Amino acid sequence: MKDTLSIGYRGEQAATEYLLAHGFRILDRNWRAGRYELDIVARKKDTLHFVEVKSRKKGSLTTPEEALTPAKFNALCHAARAWLASHPCNLEINFDLAAVDLTPEGCTVRYIPNAVTPHW
């Protein structure tokens, strides 16, 4: 479990650094509403980005992209609704994925905007 937490922390840190370097403003990290969590909430211009971070060690059996399942996206939508209820805004909303590959030498971030489309 400790290794999993370490992988998750490293991936979220790499994703945050990537977003900051590409002009995003971080509004929240690890925001919780009950059992639901948002990894990163960011803003860039007139768009609000709910960014799900999925991290894997390089060479893992599954890719980070494969880890964003329909059930995980459903939970992400619940969390996003809760965040919006407590932070009203009139911005365009994107659900993005930061896919992070971890190696002993560092991290590679693949940022996928509009990775999934909500049906709410």
Image (cartoon, helix red, strand yellow):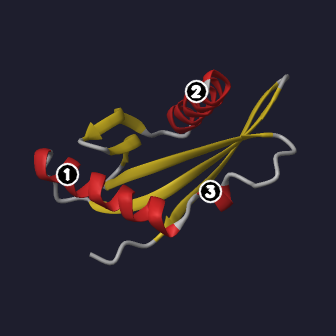
Residue pictured at 22% horizontal, 58% vertical: 81
Image location of residue 8, percent across then percent down:
59, 32
Q: Upstream in the sequence, badge 1 or badge 2?
A: 2
Q: Nearer the viewer, mark 1 or mark 3?
A: 3
Judge left or right: residue 44 versus residue 13.
Answer: left
In this rendering, the answer to whether 76 lies above or below 98 is below
Distance of mark 1 from mark 2, alpha carbons? 25 Å
Looking at the rendering, which quadrant does residue 42 occupy?
A: top left
Disc 1 to disc 3: CB gap under 8 Å = no
Judge left or right: residue 84 versus residue 23.
Answer: left
Structural crowding at the residue carrying mark 3, measured as other residues with C-alpha within 10 Å and reported as few (<14), some (14–19) or many (≥20): some
Image location of residue 66, percent across then percent down:
67, 61
Which residue lies under the disc numbered 2? 5
Q: Which mark is residue 67?
A: 3
Which residue lies under the disc numbered 1? 82
Residue pictured at 37% horizontal, 58% vertical: 75
Distance of mark 1 from mark 3, alpha carbons? 23 Å
Disc 3 to disc 2: CB gap under 8 Å = no
